[in-house]
Image (cartoon, rainbow, N blue to C red):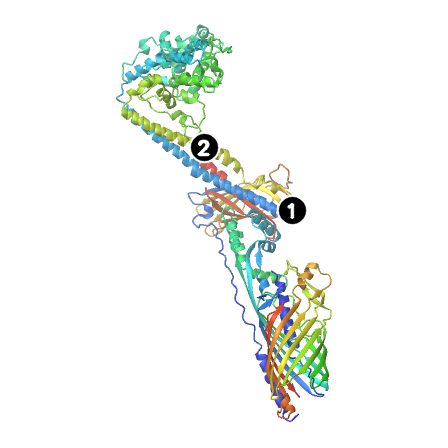
C-alpha cells in the first residue's frame, strides 16, 4: 500500500491552510498610522476529503489507499519459506503473483482550523511591522476497509479442495484476508508507523514577521511593499503518522510582496498584488519510500529544499463611509516542487518529490463591517472591522479541495 | 482614542473573537465506514462419528508417506514441481480407484450376470430337447461324418486348393490323426463316466476304426443294456489303444527303465497297470487331483515322463517316444514313431498355419489357401474333435471373447462358455451318450457344423421350442461375450494404462526433491492408524529405521492412552501423540535419541539414492509431524501436513511437508474383487 503518499497529501492540506492564512485576495496598501496598534484575529476553517491530482482531476483524499492486495504482497508478508511455498502453489495453479486478492478502500475526512492573532504596529505613518502566530487545531477521521475478490475465494477453494488438503493453511489465509485491515495496521506498527485511526492535534504554526512600507498614497492609487520571513515554529510532519497534519514547513522562508491599490469613484477600489516566498534549504525526516514499497522503509533525515511559492491576486472592493465592506477577488497560488538531496536512491527521490508541485486558482468573496472610517470621523467609539470571507477553489493541481471560510476581527488601539 | 473605556471593550472583544474561533474548532466529520468483506472459513472434513475416517467396521488405514524437510530457500519453481507431482499423483490414484470401483468391478459383476443368464438356458434347452429322437440324429450325423473327410478333400482338390499329391498325402496322414484321437480319448478323464454307447474318439474316424477292427469286442464296446450306462475304459484301451498302430511292436516291446523294473517291456507294464478294470491307469486318470491327473494324461500321451515321479515309475519310459525329425513335407513319415500329442496337432491347424503340423497335411504357403483349407477341413475336424477338459487346456488362444477369454478370477469363459447342444450334438451328445449328465460341446464349433452345408438337414430334428431357446441363448451368449470383452478392455485399461502411470506418489520419485536447494531431508514412512473402541492406535516407522514408533490417543478428548509393553517390544519408541477430532489431525512427536535408528541418519544425497539427510546435530532434537487426513473419490485417503524439527525449547529449526495415502491398501482390497 502506498500509505506514505497519504501523508504527502495531508502536508498539502496544511500548506494550503498556511497560505490561506497569510495570502489573502483582499490585500491593500494601507498601513497603520505611527504609534497605532492593531490586532487582527483571523480564523480560518476548512473541511476536506478530496484532492486534485497532477491533471487537476478530483479524487478522494484517501484514493491512494484504494489499492489491490496482491498475492505477491501476501507472500511477502509471510515468513520466507512459507512465502516461497505460497509462490509455488500459485505457480502450480496458474495464478500470477501480481493478481489481486482484493482491494482496500478508505475514507479520510479532515478539518483544520487556524486561529491567527496578527499584531501590527505603526512604526511610521508609512511603515508597519506585523507578527502573526497561527494556532492550528486539526483532526482527521479515517476508515479503511477491504473487499476480497473472487481470487481470494479461488485461493481458499484451491487450498481446501480434498486433493490439496491444505485446509489449515486455507483457514489461516481466510483469517488474514478477513483481517486485511488489521494486517495492514500490524504491518504499519511493525514498521514504526501508527495504525490508521482518527487523529487530532493542536499547536502553533509557523510564525510570520512582516514589514510593510507604503511608498505611494495619493487620491488615485497606493503602492506598498511587504517583506518578511516565516519562521519554522510550527510542528513538522511526523513521518510515522500517515494522516498527520503538520503545522509548519520546518524551514525559514523569506518573502516579498508588492501591492497596488487603485481608488475608484463611489467608494470602489481595486487591488493587485504579487508575492514570492523563497524557502531556504533545510533538513527533514522522511521515510525512504519508493513507488513499490512505502511501509517497510526506514526514516532518514535528508537535505530538503521545499519548493518556493508564488502568490498573486486581484480584488474589487466596495467600502462606503457608513462601514460596509464587500468585495470579490481572485488569487493564484503556486508552490514549486520539493527537492530532496542526500544519499537517497533515485526511486526514493522520485517518490518523495511526486505531487509536491501545487497550484490553485481561487475566487474569494468578502462581506463585513468596519468602524474605522466612522471612528476617524468621530462617529464611532472604537475602530474595528469585522468581516467574513469565503474562498472558493476554482481549480487546482495536487491540492486538497478545501474551500475556506475566514472570520477576521481587526481591532485598533 | 478615548482610552477610558477602551481597555474593557478591547478585552471583551478579544475574548469574544477568541471564543468564536475556538468554538469553530470541532473534530473532523466521521469518515464513511468502509466495507470489510468476510470470507467463509473453510471447514475441515471432519465427522465426529468417523474419527480419522475410521469406524468400528472400517477400523484400520495404512498410509505410505513421504517426509521432506525444506531447505531455507527452495525456489517457487521447485515447490511448484513438488506440489504438481503430489497433487497429480493423488488425482491419478483417486481416479484409478474410482475406475476400479465404478467400472472394473461392476464389469465383472456384469459378466457374471450375463453368464448366469446364458447358463440359465441350458436347463431349458435340455428340457425342451427331451422328446428329440437322438438315435435318428446320430444316424444322420454319422452318415455324413463317415465320408466327410474324403468328401472335403475332393472338394478342396476340385477347387484347386490342394493338389492331387496333397490329397494323397492327406489321406495317408489321416489315420495318424485318428489314432492320436484314440489315444487322446484313452487318456481322457471322462472315460470314468458311464455312457449308453461307446464314446467315439472322433466321429470322422469311425470308418477308419471299423476298417481296423477296433472296438470289435461287443462285450466291452457294445451299447449299454442298462439304462444307467456302462464304463468304456477297457473298451477304449483293449479294443482301441492296445490295437492301435501307434502301439506298434517296436514300441510295446521296448524294455523298461530303470533296469530294476519288474516289467520286461512296455506291453507287460501297461498290461499289468491296466488289469481287468483299468487298474492303476484308470485310477490315475480319474484321480481327485485334477492337476496331477492332467500330468499323467500328458505323460500317457508321450511327454514329460521324467518330469514327475509317477505311478508308473517302474517303467518310466513306458510311454516315451523319441520322435524323428520331420523331413520334407511331401514325404509321408512313419507316423507311428511320433507322439500322439504331436499328431493331434494335425487337427489344430490354425488360420495362421505356422504349426509344424502343417507338414503332415501339406498346404501351400499361401495364407489365403491355408485359410480356405482351414475353413473347409480343419475347422470341421475341430468341431468334432473338441472335447471338454481337453479343449480347455489345449486352447491357448487369449482373444477376448467369452469362449476363449480366461483371465483369472472366476471368469473362465473358455472352459465354460459352451452350451448344451442336444441337437445337433456331434462328438459328444450324439455319440458319447452320457448317463446322468450331459457332455458339453464347444459352442463355437457347433456353429461351424450348423452352418456347414453337409449338415444342412440337422436342424430339421430340432423342435421349434428348442430353436427358439437356442436363438435366445445365442443372444445371451453374445451379451456374455460382449460383457467379457468389455470387462477385458476395462481391466486391461486399468492394468495397462491407469495403474502403470500411478507408480508411487512418494516424493522419492520426484527428481526435483533431490535438486540442490529444494530439500535437506527425504525419507519415506508408513503410518498405521487403527481404531480400537474409543482409541486410535498409531504405529509408524521410517525407511532405514530399526526402531518403530507407537502411540495411542483417546478419541473423545485427545488425551494419550497407554501403549502396551508387548506392542512396544524391546526397541519400540513411544510417540507423544495428539488427536484433534475437529480437524482430523493426528500430531505426533518423538525425540531423536538415536537419529539413525529412527530413520534420520547422516545420509548424503546420491544420484540413485532414495533417502537423504543433510540436517546435522539432530541428536536430542524432537520430530513433530502433523498428519491431516482427507478422503478423495474412490475412498482414497490421504494425509498432508507439516513436519518440524524442534529444539529443546520447542523452537522450530526446520520445517517440512508430508504426503501420503492408502492407495496400496485400498488397491489391494479392490483387486481381490476384480
Q: Position of residue A345 (x, y in %)?
A: 70, 59
- Position of B128 with respect to A399 (left or right) is left
- Position of B281 with respect to B328 (left or right) is left
Q: Nearer the viewer, residue B421 or B199?
A: B421
- Is mark 1 in CB contact (under 8 Å) with mark 2? no
Disc 1 target residue: B617
Q: Secondary structure at mark 2?
A: helix
Query: Which residue is at 57% across, 78% downward?
Result: B24
Residue A54's image quarter? bottom right
Output the chain of dot 1. Answer: B
From this viewpoint, is residue B284 visible? no
Query: Which residue is at 69% across, 72% downward?
Result: A310
Q: Which mark is residue B489?
A: 2
Which quarter of the rendered picture does the C terminus of chain B lie within? Answer: top left
Q: Nearer the viewer, mark 1 or mark 2?
A: 2
Q: Position of residue A375 (x, y in %)?
A: 64, 90
Q: Nearer the viewer, residue A384 or B545?
A: A384
Q: Position of residue B295 (x, y in %)?
A: 44, 19
Q: Earlier in the sequence, mark 1 or mark 2?
A: 2
From this viewpoint, is residue A201 visible? yes
Amino acid at each position: 500500500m502506498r500509505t506514505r503518499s497519504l501523508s504527502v497529501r495531508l502536508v498539502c492540506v496544511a500548506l494550503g491552510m498556511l497560505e490561506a492564512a497569510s495570502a489573502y485576495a483582499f490585500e491593500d496598501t494601507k498601513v497603520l498610522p505611527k504609534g497605532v496598534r492593531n490586532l487582527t484575529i483571523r480564523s480560518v476553517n476548512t473541511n476536506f476529503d478530496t484532492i486534485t491530482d497532477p491533471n487537476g482531476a478530483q479524487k478522494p483524499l484517501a484514493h491512494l489507499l484504494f489499492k489491490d492486495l496482491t498475492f505477491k504482497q501476501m507472500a511477502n508478508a509471510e515468513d520466507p519459506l512459507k512465502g516461497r511455498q505460497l509462490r509455488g502453489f500459485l505457480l502450480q495453479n496458474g495464478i500470477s503473483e501480481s493478481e489481486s486478492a482484493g482491494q482496500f478502500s478508505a475514507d479520510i475526512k479532515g478539518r483544520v482550523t487556524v486561529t491567527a492573532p496578527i499584531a501590527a504596529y505603526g512604526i511610521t505613518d508609512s511603515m508597519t511591522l506585523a507578527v502573526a502566530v497561527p494556532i492550528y487545531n486539526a483532526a482527521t477521521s479515517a476508515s479503511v476497509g477491504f473487499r476480497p475478490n473472487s481470487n481470494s475465494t479461488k485461493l481458499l477453494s484451491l487450498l481446501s479442495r480434498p486433493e490439496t488438503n491444505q485446509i489449515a493453511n486455507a483457514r489461516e489465509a481466510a483469517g488474514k484476508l478477513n483481517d486485511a485491515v488489521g494486517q495492514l495496521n500490524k504491518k504499519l506498527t511493525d514498521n514504526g508507523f501508527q495504525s490508521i485511526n482518527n487523529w487530532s492535534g493542536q499547536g502553533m504554526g509557523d510564525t510570520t514577521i512582516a514589514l510593510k512600507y507604503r511608498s505611494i498614497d495619493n487620491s488615485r492609487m497606493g503602492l506598498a511593499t511587504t517583506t518578511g520571513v516565516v519562521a519554522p515554529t510550527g510542528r513538522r510532519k511526523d513521518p510515522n503518522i500517515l494522516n498527520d497534519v503538520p503545522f509548519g514547513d520546518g524551514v525559514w522562508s523569506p518573502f516579498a510582496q508588492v501591492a497596488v491599490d487603485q481608488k475608484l469613484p463611489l467608494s470602489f477600489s481595486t487591488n493587485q498584488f504579487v508575492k514570492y516566498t523563497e524557502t531556504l534549504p533545510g533538513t527533514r525526516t522522511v521515510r525512504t519510500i519508493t513507488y513499490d514499497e512505502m511501509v517497510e522503509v526506514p526514516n532518514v533525515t535528508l537535505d530538503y529544499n521545499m519548493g518556493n511559492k508564488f502568490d498573486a491576486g486581484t480584488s474589487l472592493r466596495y467600502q462606503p463611509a457608513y462601514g460596509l465592506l464587500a468585495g470579490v477577488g481572485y488569487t493564484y497560488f503556486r508552490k514549486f516542487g520539493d527537492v530532496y538531496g542526500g544519499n537517497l536512491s533515485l526511486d526514493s527521490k522520485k517518490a518523495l518529490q511526486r505531487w509536491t508541485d501545487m497550484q490553485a486558482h481561487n475566487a474569494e468573496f468578502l462581506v463585513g463591517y468596519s468602524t474605522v472610517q466612522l471612528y476617524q470621523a468621530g462617529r464611532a467609539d472604537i475602530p474595528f472591522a469585522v468581516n467574513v470571507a469565503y474562498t472558493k477553489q476554482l481549480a487546482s493541481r495536487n491540492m486538497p479541495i478545501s474551500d475556506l471560510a475566514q472570520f477576521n476581527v481587526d481591532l485598533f488601539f | 482614542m478615548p482610552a477610558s473605556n477602551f481597555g474593557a471593550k478591547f478585552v471583551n472583544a478579544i475574548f469574544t473573537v477568541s471564543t468564536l474561533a475556538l468554538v469553530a474548532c470541532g473534530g473532523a466529520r466521521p469518515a464513511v465506514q468502509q466495507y470489510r468483506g468476510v470470507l467463509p472459513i473453510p471447514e475441515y472434513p471432519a465427522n465426529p462419528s468417523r474419527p480419522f475416517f475410521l469406524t468400528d467396521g472400517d477400523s484400520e488405514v495404512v498410509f505410505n508417506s513421504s517426509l521432506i524437510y525444506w531447505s531455507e530457500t527452495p525456489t517457487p519453481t521447485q515447490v511448484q514441481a513438488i506440489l504438481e507431482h503430489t497433487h497429480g499423483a493423488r488425482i491419478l490414484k483417486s481416479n484409478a480407484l474410482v475406475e476400479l470401483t465404478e467400472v472394473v468391478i461392476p464389469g465383472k459383476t456384469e459378466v457374471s450376470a450375463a453368464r448366469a443368464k446364458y447358463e440359465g438356458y441350458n436347463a431349458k434347452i435340455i428340457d425342451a430337447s427331451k422328446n428329440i429322437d437322438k438315435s435318428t440324429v446320430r444316424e444322420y450325423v454319422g452318415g455324413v461324418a463317415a465320408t466327410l473327410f474324403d468328401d472335403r478333400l475332393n472338394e478342396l482338390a476340385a477347387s484347386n486348393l490342394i493338389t492331387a499329391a496333397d490329397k494323397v498325402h492327406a489321406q495317408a496322414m489321416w489315420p495318424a490323426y485318428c489314432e492320436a484321437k484314440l489315444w487322446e480319448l484313452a487318456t481322457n478323464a471322462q472315460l470314468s463316466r458311464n455312457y449308453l454307447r461307446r464314446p467315439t474318439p472322433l466321429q470322422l474316424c469311425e470308418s477308419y476304426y471299423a476298417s481296423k477292427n477296433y472296438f470289435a469286442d461287443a462285450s466291452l464296446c457294445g451299447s449299454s443294456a442298462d439304462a444307467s450306462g456302462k464304463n468304456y475304459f477297457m473298451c477304449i484301451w483293449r479294443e482301441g489303444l492296445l490295437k492301435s498302430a501307434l502301439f506298434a511292436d517296436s514300441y510295446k516291446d521296448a524294455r523298461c527303465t530303470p533296469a530294476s523294473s519288474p516289467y520286461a517291456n512296455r506291453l507287460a507294464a501297461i498290461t499289468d497297470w491296466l488289469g481287468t478294470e483299468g487298474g492303476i491307469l484308470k485310477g490315475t486318470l480319474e484321480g481327485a487331483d485334477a492337476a496331477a491327473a492332467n500330468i499323467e494324461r500328458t505323460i500317457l500321451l508321450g511327454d514329460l515322463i521324467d518330469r514327475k515321479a509317477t505311478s508308473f515309475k517302474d517303467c518310466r519310459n513306458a510311454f516315451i517316444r523319441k520322435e524323428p525329425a520331420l523331413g520334407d513335407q511331401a514325404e509321408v513319415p512313419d507316423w507311428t514313431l511320433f507322439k500322439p500329442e504331436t499328431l493331434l496337432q494335425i487337427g489344430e491347424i490354425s488360420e495362421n498355419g505356422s504349426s509344424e503340423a502343417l507338414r503332415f497335411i501339406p498346404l501351400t504357403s499361401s495364407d489365403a489357401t491355408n485359410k480356405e483349407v482351414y475353413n473347409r477341413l480343419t475347422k470341421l475336424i475341430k468341431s468334432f474333435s473338441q472335447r471338454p477338459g481337453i479343449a480347455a487346456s489345449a486352447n491357448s488362444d487369449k482373444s477376448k471373447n467369452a469362449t476363449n477369454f480366461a483371465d483369472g478370477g472366476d471368469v473362465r469363459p473358455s472352459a465354460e462358455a459352451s452350451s448344451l447342444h442336444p441337437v445337433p450334438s456331434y462328438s459328444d451328445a450324439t455319440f458319447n451318450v452320457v448317463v446322468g449328465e450331459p457332455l458339453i460341446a464347444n459352442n463355437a464349433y457347433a456353429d461351424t457344423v450348423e452352418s456347414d452345408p453337409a449338415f444342412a438337414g440337422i436342424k430339421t430334428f430340432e423342435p421349434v421350442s428348442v430353436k427358439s431357446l437356442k436363438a435366445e441363448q445365442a443372444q445371451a451368449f453374445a451379451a456374455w461375450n460382449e460383457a467379457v470383452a468389455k470387462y477385458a478392455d476395462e481391466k486391461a485399461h486399468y492394468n495397462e494404462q491407469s495403474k502403470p502411470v500411478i507408480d508411487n506418489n512418494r516424493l522419492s520419485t520426484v527428481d526435483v526433491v533431490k535438486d540442490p536447494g529444494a530439500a535437506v531431508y527425504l525419507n519415506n514412512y508408513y503410518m498405521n492408524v487403527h481404531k480400537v473402541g474409543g482409541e486410535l492406535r498409531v504405529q509408524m516407522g521410517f525407511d532405514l529405521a530399526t526402531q518403530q514408533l507407537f502411540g495411542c490417543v483417546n478419541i473423545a478428548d485427545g488425551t494419550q492412552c497407554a501403549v502396551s509393553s508387548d506392542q512396544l517390544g524391546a526397541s519400540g519408541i513411544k510417540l507423544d501423540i495428539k488427536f484433534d477430532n475437529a480437524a482430523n489431525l493426528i500430531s505426533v512427536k518423538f525425540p531423536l535419541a538415536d537419529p539413525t535408528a529412527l530413520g534420520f541418519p547422516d545420509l548424503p544425497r546420491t544420484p540413485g539414492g532414495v533417502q537423504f539427510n543433510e540436517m546435522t546435530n539432530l541428536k536430542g532434537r524432537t520430530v513433530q509431524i502433523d498428519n491431516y487426513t482427507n478422503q478423495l473419490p474412490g475412498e482414497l485417503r490421504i494425509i498432508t501436513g507439516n513436519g518440524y524439527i524442534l529444539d529443546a525449547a520447542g523452537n522450530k529449526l526446520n520445517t517440512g511437508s508430508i504426503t501420503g495415502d492408502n492407495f496400496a491398501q485400498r488397491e489391494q482390497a479392490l483387486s481381490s474383487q476384480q
